[in-house]
Image: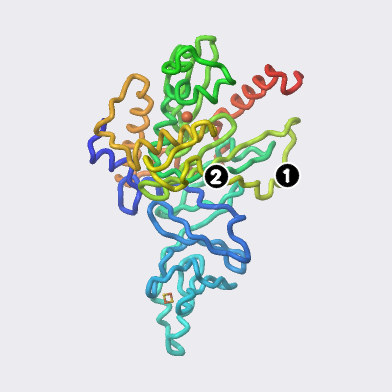
Amino acid sequence: MLTKEENDFITRVGPGTPAGEFLRRYWLPVGYPQELTDEQPTRFVRVLGEDLVLWKDKSGNVGLIQDHCAHRGASLMYGRVEERGISCAYHGWLFNTAGDCLECPAEPAGSNFHLTVKIKAYPVRKYIGMYWTYMGPLPAPQIPPYDLWERKDGHRTLILQPQLDANWVQPMENSMDPAHLQILHQTLAFGGRKPESTTRGFTDDVAAFDFYETEYGIIKRRTYRNGHVDEHPVIFPNILRQANATQIRVPIDDEHTKIFFVRFEPTEDGSIVEDEGDPPVIYRPSYKDPAGVLHPYSRFDMQADVQAQDHMAWETQGPITDRSVERLATTDRGIVMYRQMLKREIEKVQMGLDPKCTWRDPSRPTIDTNLQAALDERRDMARARGEIART
Ligand code: FES
Ligand SMILES: [Fe+2]
């Protein structure tokens, strides 16, 4: 249980909020290269409660700037993109990707007024087929070299989930909640097995749940009665790695979250993929009907897939779930651990320190989240089902 103040402390993401300032210490994906075309080189994005425009100038530079023009507030999403930058559609004030104003065309000849104008601009980098931004104080840290993102012996696929109309901490807590798999996902995640009791689902398959902290986050571990062990790392603060995918949860604002999946498929013979290009992007359609409408005025398709079931659970908890009335139980101790870590790391930022998972050493080797074990397990299961030949 958390007080309202404690709940606000870990959930709210706007500028100046404790969790908002903390999340601004990490690189966050904000879009895909395919979304900026010659015909439409600008795109509105809201990230951490800030209204921004992602755009590409005719020289190929990509920027992320405030939506409202510094002059009198028209949206720069309608700006005309040129070689030097983006020119506001209203009176032509021209900005570059650094947020400098290069020209105010209607000012008197020789005026240097434009030199006094500056707009908010964040750095953008392209990495594994996505544009990423960093909205915190400079110098920026690295984009972390996690194994699933760095490996060269395979192909990545990118999936954008339908917008989650709920706060980002809800999916993160779900990633520390091992008990729900056997119950919420009993119809879809167990190969057609039928449980004896729909209340218990497959709970009795599990002997123990454990959690432990690592350099990059928290592992939740399920030990099954048949001896099988299943581990999923939460990569702190906003990523789950489950099997061969990372699920990156990026707060749009306090009550909406954008979820980027990155899936990795290794080559069968371990060969290196020289140039992956921009991996394909799959946009998942809404899991609810009507789309974009909040509970209880929409209904989730609970048979669509596992993610749809998760989205149901996360959204129906409320836009920001009220943690002052929850009743945490034994299997929620991973959630408590995650909340404590979040609080500890937010407080570090308040003290002027780098939070966990801030990597600043460019020579740092790839960070091993034990992806290979997950890939081996998947391969062994496919073999057991006869889908691929034994070698
Ligand atoms: S509002 Fe943008 S130039 Fe006037
Ligand atoms: Fe789930």
Quadrant where the C terminus is found in the figure: top right
Coordinates of residue 155 in the picture (x, y in percent): 67, 40
Q: Nearer the viewer, mark 2 or mark 1?
A: 2
Residue 376 relative to residue 388: left or right: left
- Say what secondary structure mark 2 lies in: loop
The residue shown at (58%, 35%) is 147
Residue 230 relative to residue 340: left or right: right
The residue shown at (44%, 14%) is 208
**Residue 69, placed above or below residue 282:** below
Coordinates of residue 79 in the picture (x, y in percent): 51, 71
Quadrant where the N terminus is found in the figure: top left
Query: How would you rate the neighbour count of disc 1 (Cα within 10 Å): few for under 14, some for 14-19, many for 20 or more?
Result: few
Residue sitting farthest toward the top: 226
Residue 281 relative to residue 65: left or right: right
Write down the quadrant of residue 15 in the picture: bottom left
Q: Amino acid at mark 2?
A: Pro
**Residue carrying label 2:** 285
Which one is in front, 277 or 39?
A: 39
Coordinates of residue 157 in the picture (x, y in percent): 63, 41
**Residue carrying label 1:** 274
